[in-house]
Amino acid sequence: MGCGITSGLKLNTLKKMAEKKKDKSEETFEVMDMVEYAKKQRWWNKIFGKNSGPVAEKYDVATQLAIGGVSGWCAGYLFQKVGKLAASAVGGGFFLLQIANHTGYIKVDWKRVERDVNKAKKQLKLNTEKPSKEVRTKVDEVQTFVKKNIVLTGGFAGGFLLGLAS
């Protein structure tokens, strides 16, 4: 008796599934332009999924400040250490070049250096009149991120300055 009820239920379920399949074959679907859809998606949604929206939507103010402050301090501390190393390397390089120049190991054509520097200045003046479209787009993206995550950004800025000072 139990077997008959179970097989009857299975048969009814199979009939309903077959009816649904018939209904689905008659459905119409909207055609999406994937290029436009991709342009509307944020880059972090493409990488991390839909649950990765702005931090302001997910965490309270104290958590945002803590995350921003700690990450800012780490970035500032690393920036300070790498900056010192880079400044030492560049300064040491100039120092060695001056020693080599005064001892006669190398001969610098200062007129050529001046001519090349002036040429580079002219090229920079021509290229700085109007920023490129990519630069404007990135600046707009950064401004939007800062506006949406102002607490996190403020914590990061404060932490960055503390990291530079430590």
Image: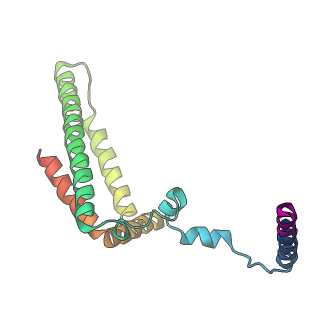
Q: Quadrant of the C terminus?
A: top left
Q: Is residue 86 left or right of residue 49?
A: left
Image location of residue 31, percent across then percent down: 74, 76
Display coloring: rainbow
Q: Quadrant of the N terminus?
A: bottom right
| Residue 129 visible in the displayed image | no
Front residue of 137/94: it is 137
> Taken as a whole, is the magenta stretch helix, strand or loop?
helix
Q: What residue is rendered at 20% in x and 53% in y?
A: 160
Image location of residue 135, percent across then percent down: 42, 64
Write down the quadrant of residue 92 in the picture. Answer: top left
29 versus 35 height, above or below: below
Front residue of 103/142: it is 142
User: What residue occupies the far front of the structure in this picture?
Assistant: 1
* Residue 28 on the magenta span: no
Front residue of 41/48: it is 48
Image location of residue 127, percent across then percent down: 39, 61
- The magenta-colored residue range is 1-9
Q: What residue is rendered at 70% in x and 75% in y?
A: 32
